[in-house]
Image (cartoon, grey):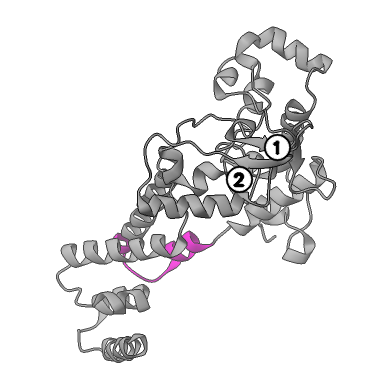
Amino acid sequence: MNWISWSKACRSKAEGGLGLKNLGLFNLSLLGKWGWRLLVEKNALWDRVLYSIYGPRFGREGGFPSSKCFVSGSWWWRDLGDLGSRRIGVDSGWFSSHSRREVGEGGSIGFWSDLWVGEVCLRDKFQRLFQVALHKDASLKSMGVWRNDSWCWSLSWRRNLFEWEKEEERILLNVLQDVSPLYEGEDGWVCSQAKDGVYSVKSVYFVLLNEVSSVDSDFYNRLWCCNVPSKFKCLAWRVSLWRIWTARNNIVFEHSSFNLEEILFSIHLLSWNIIRARFPSFVFSFLVWVFNPLLCIQSSTTCSPNSPFLLYSSCYCRQKKQDLS
């Protein structure tokens, strides 16, 4: 019998799977339904019951309850606060990225923190302006005034902006020029993965399933099976994990953007520097290393620097330099 992993069996038949239900993702999408109800069903009976249990900490100002509310309580309540668990391969921001604000009068919408215009919140898109903003927790309604039945934006800063910051401010105003709050109207929520804007367990389940399938990779399986000494395998494994972890921390704590090319370049550069320092017999240039690291390692351990591969790679890199110039 040929065994396959459960994640592959849960893929659709069109993707080579068996179409089985991924229970972890399905339970997560069901839990997300409760998170959605927390957003849209205000003052419902069960909502008032939760408020009576968790008290003032449950205040959420129109949005999802703060993380402090989920420190204690039942397992269901704590799981609800951990909707973005990475234990099953789902990105930690999946729930918030699929839930965006529907603008009414804007009193309960965070101008910087909520997703109400564009694909990302303004806090992440205009990080420098957010740092110098006078009111970082300001609502959308408080960031402008109505004049003669037309909405006028009024942005406040802690200090005078530099010239390059004024350019960012102009870009921000261009983003805002086509959107404005309503004079009267209640703020709402829209699920971006549903056609009618209402959270659907089925649609969100397939979105999560596609996200897990898209990040599946056989890189490490190929790494451990390649025909090179174990010390090189361990080095490649440690370097890749370190750079990926560093990039993850920069995204979480410094709000930097994700750039796959920069991560791959840093992995190539760090591994090349370490191998050159540890193995004096390694004589390949960085361009040759980027061209094919596996053949570089195999050639450095099995043949001389005058090998046909080295000569071919040198010619290839010279041609690449000419093409780039």
Up-down relation of residue 222 to residue 95 (above or below): below
Label 1 SS: helix
For the residue labelled by badge 2, is the local secondary structure a helix, a strand or a loop? loop
Mark 2 Cα-neighbour bin, 10 Å: few <14, some 14–19, many ≥20: many
Q: Earlier in the sequence, mark 2 or mark 1?
A: 1
- CA gap, disc 2 to disc 1? 10 Å
Given the current orientation, which residue lies at the most extreme left position? 280
Verify whether residue 221 appears in magenta.
yes
Q: Residue at x 35, y 85 (%)?
A: 324
Q: Which mark is residue 115?
A: none
Residue most extreme to the front: 148
* Residue in front for this viewpoint, 72 or 5: 72
Q: In this orientation, which residue lies closer to the viewer: 298 or 112?
A: 112
Q: Is residue 70 left or right of residue 17?
A: left
Who's the residue at 20% across and 84% down the image? 304
Residues under numbered marks 2 and 1 in contact, where contact means CB atoms less than 8 Å apart: yes
Q: Is residue 98 left or right of residue 242?
A: right
**Left or right: where 199 falls relative to 232:** right
Q: Where's residue 160, x and y in %?
A: 37, 41
Q: Residue at label 1?
A: 28
On whether residue 275 falls in the magenta region, the answer is no
Residue at left offset 29%, top offset 65% = 269
Most distant residue in the right direction? 196
Q: Please state which amino acid type lies under the numbered disc 2.
A: Val
- Residue 194 can be seen in this image: yes
Region in magenta: 218-232
How many numbered marks appear?
Answer: 2
Q: Which residue is mark 2?
A: 90
Q: Residue at x 16, y 63 (%)?
A: 277
Please state, as top left, top right, bottom left or bottom right, where the C terminus lies in the image.
bottom left
Instruction: Give the residue type that dot 1 points to.
Output: Leu
| Residue 100 visible from this viewpoint | no
